[in-house]
Amino acid sequence: MPALVNSSGDDEMYPGGSMDLGGCLYTISSNVDVYCSPTKRARISAPFTFGAVEHKQDHKPSVEILPDECLFEIFRRLPSGKERSSCACVSKRWLMLMSTISKSEIERTNSSVEESVSSDENDEDVEGDGYLSRCLEGRKATDVRLAAIAVGTSGRGGLGKLSIRGSNSERGVTNRGLSAVAHGCPSLRSLSLWNVSSIGDKGLSEIAKGCHMLEKIDLCLCPSITNKGLIAIAEGCPNLTTLNIESCSKIGNEGLQAIAKLCPKLQSISIKDCCLVGDHGVSSLLSLASNLSRVKLQALNITDFSLAVIGHYGKAITNLVLSSLRNVSERGFWVMGVAQGLQKLVSLTVTSCRGVTDVSIEAISKGCINLKHMCLRKCCFVSDSGLVAFAKAAVSLENLQLEECNRFTQSGIIGALSNIKTKLKSLTLVKCMGVKDIDVEVSTFSPCESLRTLTIQNCPGFGSASLAMIGKLCPQLQHVDLTGLYGITDAGLLPLLENCEAGLVKVNLTGCWNLTDHIVSALARLHGGTLELLNLDGCWNITDASLAAIADNCLLLNDLDVSRCAITDAGIAVLSNANHLSLQVLSLSGCSEVSNKSSPFLTTLGQTLLGLNLQNCNAISSNTIELLVENLWRCDILA
């Protein structure tokens, strides 16, 4: 950091002197020229006389007498970014004045060009690349800091990404601060403004004038920005590829139409909770932005018309997210599917939309022939018949995720799995309250040989009978997550373990408190040669016997979580004696029976550990924790 003006007085300047900047002599007084060395100035402690005129000592540096216009002319002639940064450190006035100088206004003399080239070769003054990133949050977000960033980064690679989250309540970021960035950072490619009410159209317009390389802009909770600011961005930033707008109450259709017309490279658009955005803005974007591949629309006042436009013109769309569209009916989703325009759609996520019904998701599955990832959340009008019809028609489906869809039952899930005609790799069920145990003859259904990942979380009705049937239908499972299924027992899980022919790799049984050591022993015996991750958090019937089985059989296990289990020091000792075991992550959080006696065993395990969780292990003292931290320097320890 360049040194500030020396407070001892060595660098003081007086009236009647001049300033040598960039090899030039600047006259301070009208009646005399005095040359002052830039490295050492003479200390003057008494009044002095030139000719017959006596001047009294003035403690204020003489350069401060100069008006901003003169300082501006001096600063823009400085030879490199290093000198400009040094001058900006002198005072707030100099900093703010320096931040108003744009790149085009800096005068490049022959000597300064040579210096700049020399500095470039030494990687000290690389300008314009835009690889630097800065983030201001809360109290740190001020105009002064933005001005310092604008001046300081110009000679050190150029600012490429700026994020402002919140603002200082007393002297927060305003249009002036954003203007400083616009003047000093032409290489800016990404701008994010979150909860900044004091920035409006003027600041955004300055960015549009000075930062023509801008590619991404995020605007969230910016109530002072209107269509005028967005239109300025559209006119000044033709390279824009990504636009995210959230909770901006004054941005509407007019701004989006300008973006659609003037930003031909636009690839990604996300609009959430903007009350002025309607069908005209969304339809303009979809019909004019031919390269648009990612679309996210949430909580907007759009109707079936917008979805029809998406279905007809969205030929480049690969990822589509639709959420909380209360004015869209079944017909809108149906038309979106039958329009046959979403041929490239790979991923579709629909949340809280009443228009999603059995009829509409069947139409979507038939119209989107390349759909691989489908996620339905809180879609309460889809039932088993729609799910089975979707599974039959979705010829490319690989991932199916259903969350809080309560009309699905066990029959619908099994019917979908057995009727799937694709290579479905992953099935996820989260909080589906309609799934309950029923007696079904599995032999009448075709197995799903392609399924590798099964995730069933917090579905209280999903019990041992349902799990046993899934195990028989899906013999190639490798990843199983049964978080929160407190109803399953050893007897229900055992058929799944016995039918997994490929060998389980990751198993998460968090919160399955009815499971015992018997099932863990069976898991270790049947899949110890492939198992890499095992999570038993909250299975309070699991004891040291399970750790003994793991130590004897699990050759590849690197992540083990036995938090809130009935584990003692003896179990840790057994685990540490397994020479073939190379754990990288071990969690013992909430294991009240693990004490200071485990310290040597944990030290032994720590030779391979990268993470160790000892939170809420109240029998382990702080001294033991400190000793472990000292000995296991490679391991991150939570305590």
Image (cartoon, grey):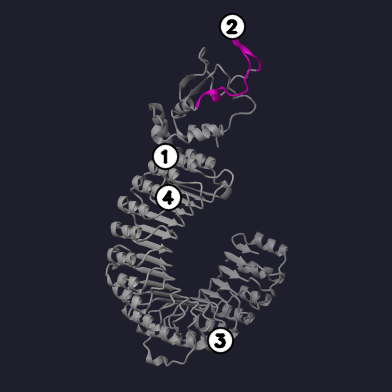
Are the residues at dot 2 and dot 4 in contact (C-beta closer than 8 Å)?
no
Is residue 115 shown in magenta? no
In this rendering, the answer to whether 176 lies above or below 83 is below
- Tell me the element at label 3: loop
Tag 1: amino acid: Glu
**Residue 539: x percent and y percent?**
60, 79
- Tell me the element at label 2: loop
Q: Whole-Å distance between the Cαs marked 3 and 1?
A: 65 Å
Judged by depth in the image, the label closer to the viewer, 3 or 4, is 4
Which one is earlier in the sequence, the residue at label 3 or at label 1?
Answer: 1
Closest to the observer, 426 or 324: 324
Which one is earlier in the sequence, the residue at label 2 or at label 4?
Answer: 2
Quarter location, residue 127: top left
Which one is earlier in the sequence, the residue at label 4 or at label 1?
Answer: 1
Judged by depth in the image, the label closer to the viewer, 2 or 1, is 2
Magenta stretch in the rendered image: 45-67
**Residue 620: x percent and y percent?**
71, 68
Which one is earlier in the sequence, the residue at label 3 or at label 2?
Answer: 2
Whether residue 371 is visible, yes or no, is: no
Q: Whole-Å distance between the Cαs marked 4 and 1?
A: 33 Å
The residue singled out by tag 1 in the image is: 127
In this rendering, the answer to whether 97 lies above or below 597 is above
The residue singled out by tag 2 in the image is: 52
**Residue 392: x percent and y percent?**
33, 81
Q: Whole-Å distance between the Cαs marked 3 and 2?
A: 106 Å
The residue singled out by tag 4 in the image is: 226
Label annotation for residue 86: none
